[in-house]
């Protein structure tokens, strides 16, 4: 049975954001990618064991676009303030793509409220020699198709994200993504030199056929973050949590269970 979740509006730093929450247990915060916030099946699965909190980033969807939002660092500091406002501690922080980029920027600044970090096919690093699809140079449909190894899996996401009724939301999301990652393209040139500051157990989950941030990016994160564990999901693209939700959840829950056992 699907886990129930509620939607609320939370105000932090004069910015109101939409926040979805469901389940019970240790807090697990999921930061979404550039396609926007939702409550897909993998969050339903995780809510069976965890208090799953899925905020919509400032500037996306129904959330406010604050005047102070200029770059990815602003979102990192915003989330640190949000965690404090919600009185969250021992957070299992999980992020995919843009959300992983934000999660990494949060963790290099402070892990005081974190129990673990999971980066899934994350943006954030420049890797010399890696061949990447530039999502700004293809159509929206082509970009979403490139997220997946199995082309049939792309259809549901295309239908959801490119629903004509949501065109205004999609345009708002795209404008914010361009502001955040247009230049430098999808990375922070200063992030790599501070990843050594991440001192909580870290999991990297990557699709072996990610065309946006190929496996070289996973290995770069693994090399830079002390003790990071890498799980590669086979026959999978940029969004393992969507394309292979069962495998993603098993990898994440196994990692979190091992961490708790070792604590």
Image (cartoon, grey):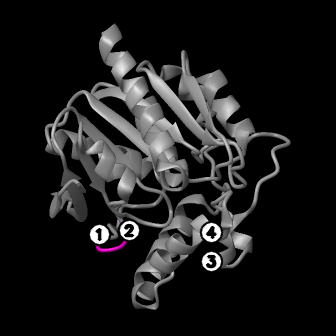
- Mark 2, Cα crowd under 10 Å, few <14 / some 14-19 / many 20+, is many
Question: Is disc 2 in contact with disc 4, using a CB cutoff of under 8 Å?
Answer: no
Q: Which residue is mark 1?
A: 63
Of pointers 3 and 1, the one earlier in the residue sequence: 1
> Nearer the N terminus, badge 4 or badge 1?
1
In space, the residues marked 4 and 1 are separated at their CA atoms by: 31 Å
Residue 147 x/y as whole percent: 63, 61
Seen from the viewer's position, the closer of residues 15 and 127 is: 127
Specify whether 174 is left or right of 172.
right
- Return the mark for residue 152: 4
Tag in front: 4 or 1? 4
Q: Residue at x 25, y 63 (%)?
A: 17
Which residue is denoted by mark 3 in the rendering?
140
Up-down: is 94 above or below 182? above
Q: Residue at x 43, y 20 (%)?
A: 201
Q: Which residues are magenta?
A: 59-63
Q: Nearer the viewer, mark 3 or mark 2?
A: 3
Pointer 1: residues within 10 angstroms few (<14), some, or many (20+)?
Answer: some
Residue 179 image offset from top left, x and y in percent? 54, 66
Crowdedness near tag 3: few (<14), some (14–19) or many (≥20) residues, C-alpha within 10 Å: some
Looking at marks 4 and 3 on the same chain, the residue that comes earlier in the sequence is marked by 3
């Amino acid at each position: 049975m699907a886990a129930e979740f509620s939607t609320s509006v939370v105000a932090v730093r004069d910015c109101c954001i939409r926040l979805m929450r469901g389940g019970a247990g240790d807090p697990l915060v999921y930061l979404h990618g550039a396609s926007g916030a939702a409550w897909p099946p993998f969050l339903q699965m995780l809510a069976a064991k965890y208090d799953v909190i899925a905020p919509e980033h400032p500037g996306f969807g129904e959330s406010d676009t604050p005047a102070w939002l200029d770059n990815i660092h602003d979102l990192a500091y915003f989330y640190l303030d949000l965690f404090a406002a919600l009185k969250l501690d021992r957070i299992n922080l999980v992020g995919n793509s843009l959300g992983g980029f934000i999660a990494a920027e949060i963790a290099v600044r402070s892990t005081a409220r974190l129990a673990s970090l999971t980066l899934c096919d994350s943006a954030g690093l420049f890797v010399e020699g890696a061949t990447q699809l530039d999502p700004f140079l293809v159509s929206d449909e082509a970009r979403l198709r490139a997220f997946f190894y199995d082309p049939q899996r792309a259809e549901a996401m295309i239908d959801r994200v490119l629903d004509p009724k949501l065109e205004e939301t999609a345009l708002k999301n795209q404008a914010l993504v361009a502001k955040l990652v247009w230049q430098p393209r999808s990375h922070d040139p200063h992030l790599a030199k501070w990843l050594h500051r991440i001192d909580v157990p870290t999991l990297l989950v990557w699709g072996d056929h990610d065309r946006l941030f190929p496996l070289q990016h996973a290995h770069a994160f693994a090399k830079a973050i002390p003790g990071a564990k890498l799980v590669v999901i086979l026959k999978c693209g940029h969004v393992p949590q969507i394309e292979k939700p069962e495998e993603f959840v098993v990898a994440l829950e196994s990692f979190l269970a091992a961490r708790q056992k070792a604590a």
